[in-house]
Image (cartoon, grey):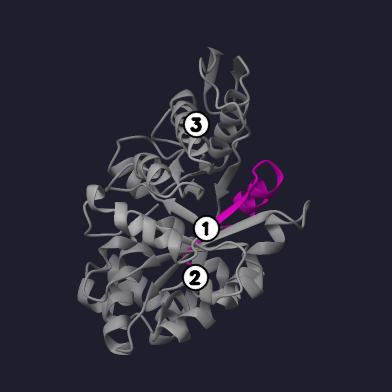
């Protein structure tokens, strides 16, 4: 999909592309830059880590803005996060680009089940991590008893030398406000263009210019039934995770998704798939021919998104949706 055919100022793509070995991304990354994409953003779940693909991309397509969406605040300590961010920032700077650190809670599934870390007080943990990491990236020596951890004499031996923006992944009001007040903006996920009108005011309560990055799932195919089948698999995999279920309850999809949630809790996976309404799939997964997809992507920008970040979904393999 050619980003140059839009009126966008910033336009991002999610990397790595699912199913493509990392070593084979050089030509893809270069082509994305040639097509007009300004940003590349990673995720971190059960595939590659968030930083390594961006360091490679900084050398393959100099000048791009590179961001993590997101690094979990629970699965690394603040100093390790700051070390990785500083190294990625220096690699991007050396190639004429910029680096943005996106932090968030991730989910209880990734944090507790897959990493064995208690998913306790997520809002406080992200707030404390943002404060600590920003201080470390600024070159400060940090001795502080935060609410969720303590640091004693932590300091980066090689700070990045230039400001590294820190953005916060957010779903509901508390984290959205944190993203706007203490972060450099919000990273949002799994929402429709219409939902942006609900989340954006919380991010921009204190600064109407705060950036909002939105990961948008796009399945460019004219086969609507095939796209919806992929979308149902994605939705049952993600929106049964408690943090996302709560998000969509808050957005007003509780009644539409209640049958899916009930079937999932009963262990009826096939019933859960069948219970996902087409209307919900069509709201959360953009599909259709490329021109129709472009129009729907631009609707996110019109609703208040600063940087749309596409995640391409192949109809036959929606597993690539596990990004953050």
Image point 46% across, 38% down: which residue? Answer: 120
- Residue lying at the far top of the rendered structure: 153
Secondary element type, mark 3: helix
The residue segment tinted magenta is 172-192
Magenta segment includes 181: yes
Q: CA distance from mark 1 to mark 3?
A: 18 Å
Image point 65% across, 68% down: which residue? Answer: 198
Secondary element type, mark 2: helix
Q: Nearer the viewer, residue 29 or 245?
A: 29
Identify the mark at residue 3; answer none if there is no mark: 2
Q: CA distance from mark 3 to mark 2?
A: 27 Å
Label located before the other in sequence (1 or 3) = 1
State left or right for residue 109 relative to residue 41.
left
Q: CA distance from mark 1 to mark 2?
A: 9 Å
State left or right for residue 274 relative to residue 96.
left
Question: Is label 1 in contact with label 2 (beta carbons under 8 Å)?
Answer: yes
- Choose top left, top right, bottom left or bottom right for residue 227: bottom left
Q: Which residue is mark 3?
A: 90
State left or right for residue 32 relative to residue 212.
left
Identify the mark at residue 137; answer none if there is no mark: none
Secondary element type, mark 1: loop
Q: Which residue is mark 1?
A: 38
User: Residue 289 placed where, x, y %?
Assistant: 39, 86
Q: Nearer the viewer, residue 133 or 296?
A: 296
User: Residue 300 placed where, x, y %?
Assistant: 58, 72
**48 lies above or below 118:** below
**216 lies above or below 178:** below
Local crowd size for mark 2, using a 10 Å CA cut-off: few (<14), some (14–19), many (≥20)? many
Image point 57% across, 47% down: which residue? Answer: 168
Question: Is label 3 in contact with label 2 (beta carbons under 8 Å)?
Answer: no
Label located before the other in sequence (3 or 2) = 2
């Amino acid at each position: 999909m050619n980003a140059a055919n839009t009126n966008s100022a910033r336009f991002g793509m999610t990397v790595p592309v699912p199913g493509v070995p990392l070593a084979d991304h050089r030509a893809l990354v270069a082509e994305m830059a040639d097509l007009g994409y300004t940003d590349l953003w990673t995720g971190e779940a059960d595939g590659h880590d968030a930083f390594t693909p961006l360091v490679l991309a900084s050398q393959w397509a100099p000048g791009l803005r590179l961001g993590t969406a997101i690094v979990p605040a629970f699965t690394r300590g603040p100093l390790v996060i700051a070390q990785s961010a500083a190294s990625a920032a220096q690699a991007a700077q050396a190639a004429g680009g910029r680096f943005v650190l996106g932090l968030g809670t991730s989910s209880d599934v990734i944090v507790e089940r897959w990493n064995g870390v208690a998913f306790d007080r997520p809002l406080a943990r992200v707030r404390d991590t943002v404060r600590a990491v920003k201080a470390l990236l600024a070159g400060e020596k940090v001795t502080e008893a935060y609410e969720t951890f303590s640091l004693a004499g932590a300091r980066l031996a090689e700070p990045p030398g230039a400001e590294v923006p820190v953005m916060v992944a957010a779903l509901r009001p508390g984290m959205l406000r944190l993203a706007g007040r203490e972060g450099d903006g919000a990273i949002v996920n799994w929402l429709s263009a219409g939902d942006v009108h609900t989340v954006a005011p919380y991010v921009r309560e204190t600064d109407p210019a705060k950036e909002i990055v939105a990961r948008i799932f796009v399945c460019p195919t004219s086969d609507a039934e095939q796209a919806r089948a992929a979308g149902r698999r994605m939705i049952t995999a993600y929106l049964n995770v408690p943090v996302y279920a709560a998000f969509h309850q808050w957005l007003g999809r509780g009644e539409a998704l209640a049958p899916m949630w009930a079937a999932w809790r009963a262990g009826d996976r096939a019933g859960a798939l069948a219970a996902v309404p087409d209307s919900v799939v069509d709201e959360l997964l953009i599909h259709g021919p490329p021109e129709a997809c472009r129009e729907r992507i631009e609707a996110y920008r019109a609703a208040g998104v600063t940087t749309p970040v596409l995640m391409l979904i192949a109809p036959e393999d929606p597993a690539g949706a596990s990004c953050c």
